Amino acid sequence: MVGLTKHYGVFTALNGIDFDVPRGSVFGLLGPNGAGKTTTIKILTGLTKPSSGSAFILGHDIVRDTIQAKKRIGVVPESSNIYEEMTAEQNLVFAAELYGVAGQDRRRRTWELLETFGLAERGRDTVAGFSRGMRRRLTIACGIIHRPEILFLDEPTTGLDVQSALVLRELVRKLNKEGTTVLLTTHYLEEADQLCDTVAMINKGKIVALDSPEKLKASVIGSNIVDVSFSEHVEEEELCKVGGVIEIHRLGDKIRLTVGSDVDVVEELTDYARTRGLRITTINTLKPSLEDAFLRITGLNPEEAGRDKEPVKMRRQDG
Amino acid sequence: MTIGEDLSKALYIARKDMKVYYFKAPNFTYGLLMPVALYLAFSVSGSLSPATLISGLVSLVILFGTMSIEAVSVVLEKQTGTFERLLAAPVSLLGLILGKALAGFAIGPLTAIAVLVPVSLFSGTSVQSPIAVFLAVCVSSFTFASMGILVSCFARWTPEAQMYSNFFRFPMAFLSGTFIPVESMPQFLQLFSRVLPLTYSIDAIREGLNNSFVTGSYLLDLGVLILFSAAFMLASAKVLERQLR
């Protein structure tokens, strides 16, 4: 896409973004709420038109050659959009019909996907009685029944239980291995880290970073991060007195410190606790994560990054 | 995309809509009971001829039956998010609208027959040209279904769609010759009735009831209804296209 811009009245949702998604890759679009991720997906899937700029799907201009472009993509929106009055099987068959899957393949693929997503036993039940997770799985199945060359996944695992999320990630890897290009947006940075070959970070309608997750993480090396908790409550301001501290955030009963790479933070904190008669309950030194890169690059704090929706989630690697 | 592909997708959308919307309670109350009740209330004077009575009632049933489905069929999908699924699919906007209209079109003849047969038998009225009446019912159904789609494309939520829908249905019901013959209306209302599709629907069905041959008036009525349908479909596509910007 080249110079993609989208205005809603006076609000600029996208401000001239450019990026290419390599064929056969898994590409992640990350950013805080309102950054422009969903608008980007909507433009690329023909659900809205750009104010200026252009985007091509496998050589088809999404504005001028919309139908041809749509034939080659699958779309899984953020919220489940299946017909409650119809059965799971009917929903999938209808999706297959809309995308021109040949008559003899429709029911076979339908039941294959119902099996894959653990819905085969409920295949002939109306969706009205399905749980949120089951609806999500069915929505995703509807998005891939025609075996698209490019799959757009907008927050695919939101609302899924752990088991279903694992199944879905496995499926994304499998589809990608079979040649499907995947473009996903996610709030779960660990998910992006695990799945994506390339990540674009978007903030205020602009691409602020575009690279592989490993390179983005490497870009924040130069500081150390430590999670620490004490036997008694300690104010964040108090810890400013610890040598070499750059940033402080409270995370529940823990305090996260970012310190310079040349500082022996464990010794500094031990000295701090000893002089005040405190006991260190837990202390973890952490490797830089994609979340650290995300926060550093976007300049947001964790609260801003997760505002309005679920917070940015990341399981850190203890070191 | 070929026209054939678009048409087949329109048929799949129509079939889906029939599954989803046909058996909802408002379709029976607004589609069948409301026009019958209205008609009974206004026809007790007995001053209307059987052909006028039947053509008016049948047209009214088609109007209320198709519009009660179509006026909410797009807006309900917008509310539940399923409309986005249709918009993301490789089908043109006109194909999508055609599919929606075809679902309403299919219910028209069913409700019309449900009313026409018992009323004709009860009143002892013979239908001179059943084929012409059936064709007029089909064309009218498509016109009113397209009108319902246009209303639904404008609306943002269901009560708004029902309000717009009644805004068109009730004035048409009174000004198209359903309860009062158009000829007995004041001149300006007679002129106004000429821009209402229901006028042509009533006229076409009455022509089929009264004549065993195709009249010029009948053909003109069908032609005007087809033009109305095309205008409603194109306007609906424009409204949706504007909403995608």
Image (spheres, coloured by chain):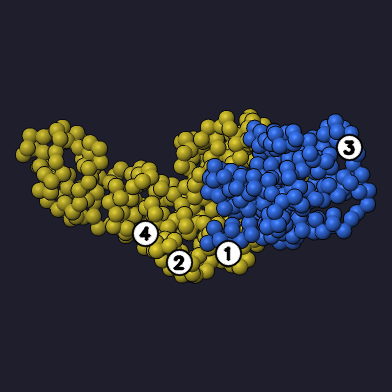
Chain colours: A yellow, B blue
Residue beneath the point at 29% across and 44% down: A319
Q: Seen in the image, is A173 located left or right of residue A7?
A: right
Tell me if residue A8 can be seen: yes
Q: Which residue is mark 4?
A: A203
Q: Earlier in the sequence, mark 2 or mark 4?
A: 2
- Which type of secondary structure does the marked residue at label 4 adopt? strand
Distance from disc 3 to disc 2, alpha carbons, whole Å, reads 65 Å
* Structural crowding at the residue carrying mark 3, measured as other residues with C-alpha within 10 Å and reported as few (<14), some (14–19) or many (≥20): some
Q: How many badges with numbers are in the image? A: 4
Q: Which residue is mark 1?
A: A62
- Which type of secondary structure does the marked residue at label 3 adopt? loop
Q: Which residue is mark 3?
A: B125
Distance from disc 4 to disc 1, alpha carbons, whole Å, reads 23 Å
Give the mark toward the camera: 2 or 4.
2
- The amino acid on which the numbered mark 4 sits, given as a three-letter code, is Asn
Residue B9: where, in percent of width, then height? Answer: 71, 52
Q: Are marks 1 and 2 on the same chain?
A: yes
